[in-house]
Image: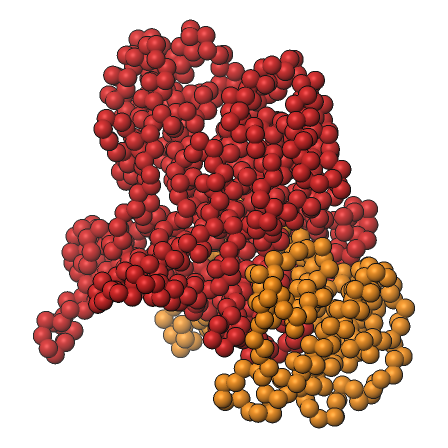
Chain colours: A orange, B red
Amino acid sequence: MSRFGAKKGNRAPGAEFTWDADPGGVPDTAPTPLYPTYVLPYARKLSEKEQKEVDYYRHLRERFHEGPYYSVLDVSSSTAKKGSAARANFDPFHGMPSYSGRYQKKRRTIPKIANIGRDYETRFFPRELWQTIMPNFRPNASIDGYNAQTVLSGLKRGFEDDEDEEDESAKRRATGADGDDAEGDANEGELLDGDEDAEEEIVDDDFEDDDDDMGGDYNAEQYFDGGDDEYGDDGFGDGGGGGDEDTY
Amino acid sequence: MMMSQYAAELCALLIEDQFGDLFARIFTTLQRYERLPLPRIKFYSRLTDRQLQHGLAAMIQHHLVFHFTSLEDGHTYYAANPHAAYYLVRSGKILQLVESRLGEYAARVMETIMYLGHAPIKHLETLPELRYLKTGTSGGADTTVKMEATPADADQEQVQEDGNEFEQELDQKPVPEEEEQQDVAFDAEVAETNGANGDHAADVGDNRPAPLNSTLKALASHGYILRVKDAHFQSPEDNYIEAHKAAANRSDIKILKGKRLTEELANKTDEIMRERTEGDLSEAWMVNGLPRGLKRKSAGGLGDSEASNKRHTGENGINGDHGYDDDENDWSEDEDGFDSSPMEPGLVVRVNYNKFDVALRNARFVEMAEANAPPVTAEIYETFLRRVEYSTKKCRDVTDIPREGEEGEQFSIPIETYKIVSDLDPDLELSSCMGPSKPPTSSSSSSTTTSNTLNRRGKRPLENGHGNGINGDHYDDNDDDNDQFNDNVDGADNEVSRAYQVNQHLSLLEQAPNNLVSQVNLSGVVKWRIGFRGLARKLRHLEIERLVEMRYGDVALRVLRVLHAKGKLDEKRLQEISLLPFKDLRQTLSSMQTGGFVDLQEVPKDAQRQPSKTIFLWYFDPDRVSSTLLEDTYKAMSRTLQRIKFERAQRRDFLEKTERSDIKGNEERWLSEGELEQLRRWRATEALLLGVVARLDDMVAVFRDF
């Protein structure tokens, strides 16, 4: 192969570099392939039965998606509440509000449990969730002569710091009270104009919780827009706008 | 329950796909940290109180989360229910199965129950989408255009079927929405008169009230739905502990000691557990040991023959009602009284996944029979299995598949031949595929023979000649068996000969290598039964062999079979038995070892363990291979689901557009030609990927559930 061997054969120097020697081959100097070649398997076409199964699956999934329980963690659109984490994840290129945004599918952040025309079998749920599934349930009232022992403090395990503990139980009490009000409001909203308000009601309220979690009074997310509401009614009728901070 | 990485990932992905990522977050947290009380979930998942409470409530509604309130400290603990999460992937299969057995409406009822998680009967009765047989506006808007197209013919069939089955209810005047369900009983009486003056009108109307109650009963009697009990919301471990405590506190247990005590305790615990979790409804609603609503067989296997049969009865109905009525009376008489009466309104039902495992397993057995037996035989087998299914509650008694060689055989109840005969479609041609049914002098091919005999007997003309299609498969080896039977085929007793033929077909299936049925001869009556465990094992092995052949070729398959048959072998013996050159053998063995299908055991001859003085034995451990394959399958499924997610994210803007509230439902109007094409292509892609997931799920079922 080397040029020094040229006198033995009668090939011209550099003949080994010719292009048409081996059309499909790789040159000697080519790097060794990292992966061996392999045959790409193709999926069989769906049979009629399988197609039907898939259709059923998708139909059911579609119903779940349309249903009251489907909920996502962050709706990263500008319709998200101001100051929330969702707002921070906002994608400025695709998420700008536009006229057609009113038709855009809205995602819940909290599954809608109560007031969806569904009766829950209360006995199947743990007692601490009864208030969630029945908004007008009063935990302190006894039902059927059964008085639950009240669990006041959070669960102590011994290794969590006390501060956390206090915080938690305090918050639980707070949210318990809040929850009542909120549900009351929701009921009113239901009376007023149906779904629209309820939709608003369940918009995630990260803001308040952040406040609780951090404990301090500095809030970076609140730094610039502490309370002013210039984008509150953006007129897009999306229902997710701000302006309801004081509901809670 | 501790889950493997990929299984956990898969469950989370499935939940996310169906319910959104809030549920998935809660579920993942619970899987990662196992049992947690609410404050701890909040701490780990970083969700707000409201999110958690609502999420958990909804997940409990869908059985995705177990909860347990301890009596000692009053705290409620939550735990993930991976089983329910996994079964989300099987919903399509289950619904398809229900449709093929009980019709489209039953599938819709089933879907609604799935959609609600669990639901009391009284709630199902109020739902608008279950009110009428046809959906004008179903609850969840139909995205799949195809969906609307495909059930069209099924509906057709369904209309005729139900025309017979639920005639009483169909004929009543549509119940207005606000009317109470109690009125149904009254309406049923009215229906009698209505039905008399002509029911053909009903065939046209779309808005007939649906036979919800009888459909629910049909579902219940098949065991497809079960009664929800408190124990279903607790994890099996909690149930066990509670049952154990309850058993230990019994007075008759307390007096026992030592070995007797532990034995009795275990028995009692099992008994209490069974009692608490048992929600089976099938027995209560069976009629004469058979589920309802199946007399008109809706088996998918029957093609034209049954359709034409039905059309026939339909015509009768139009001409004069008596033929029609007769047809109906021969079976529904005994349940006339309570067919339309509602089920107990407070009864809460949900899907019985165990029963569907049984049904799907039987479907697999039928596939196996189809692969190496003529279609008629497969159909007889299916009829037999249907009988077996009614009395089989779950696939096996133990929770895990026992190790190979350590599990005993578990037989189904034996079914008498005459029962199978009575279940069979009377028009099914049994003899045509069993070799010449006459001595060869009469005619050249068996198909003409059969049609001749039939014509002579004047039974019916062979309209579309389904005998012909079957004829292709001939089973010459049965000839000698048939000789004796040929003599009496022209004889008077048709029933007996049919029973004989059915026995012949089934004994064909009894043969090795599959042994799909086995015969028991009790006091002169021939009965048939099926050995589930052996067949399930067979399915597992077939699956492994299929994979090995695909990956490593047929040489590897031969080696694997040799190893399986002979146990542990050293290379030399293996080479002698498998008749392969050393070079090929070594190559395949090493590549299979890399893939984890075979392994090497070393047996040292001396204490030094020198390689030269060591025997190396190759072996194949089906248990281990099964469990690794199961994990691989989970992984493949979760990767496929992730792929769908990715593909969707790539087309996000477009898909969001198609989901807009104004576009959805009238895509043709708002989308351009190109966009429609794109949408169609996306649906096809997604369908293919979901189909792949469904196929992988079949494998999971084989390795884990059957």
Coordinates of residue B507 in the picture (x, y in percent) = 29, 30
Coordinates of residue B92 in the picture (x, y in percent) = 56, 48
Front one among B703 and B35: B35
Q: Residue at x 26, y 17 (%)?
A: B483
Q: Residue at x 73, y 76 (%)?
A: A178
Q: Residue at x 18, y 58 (%)?
A: B569
- Residue B294 vs A238, above or below: the answer is above
Please indicate whether residue B570 sits to the left or right of residue B174 in the image.
Answer: left
Q: Quadrant of residue A35?
A: bottom left
- Residue A20 vs B133, above or below: the answer is below
Residue B437 seen by the camera: yes
Please indicate whether residue A139 sits to the left or right of residue B484 in the image.
Answer: right
Coordinates of residue B490 in the picture (x, y in percent) = 34, 10
Front one among B446 and B492: B492
Residue A95 seen by the camera: no
Q: Residue at x 41, y 48 (%)?
A: B394
Q: Quadrant of residue B61?
A: bottom right
What is the total number of numbered labels drawn onto the structure image?
A: 0
Which residue, as the protein is rendered here, is positioned at the far top? B456
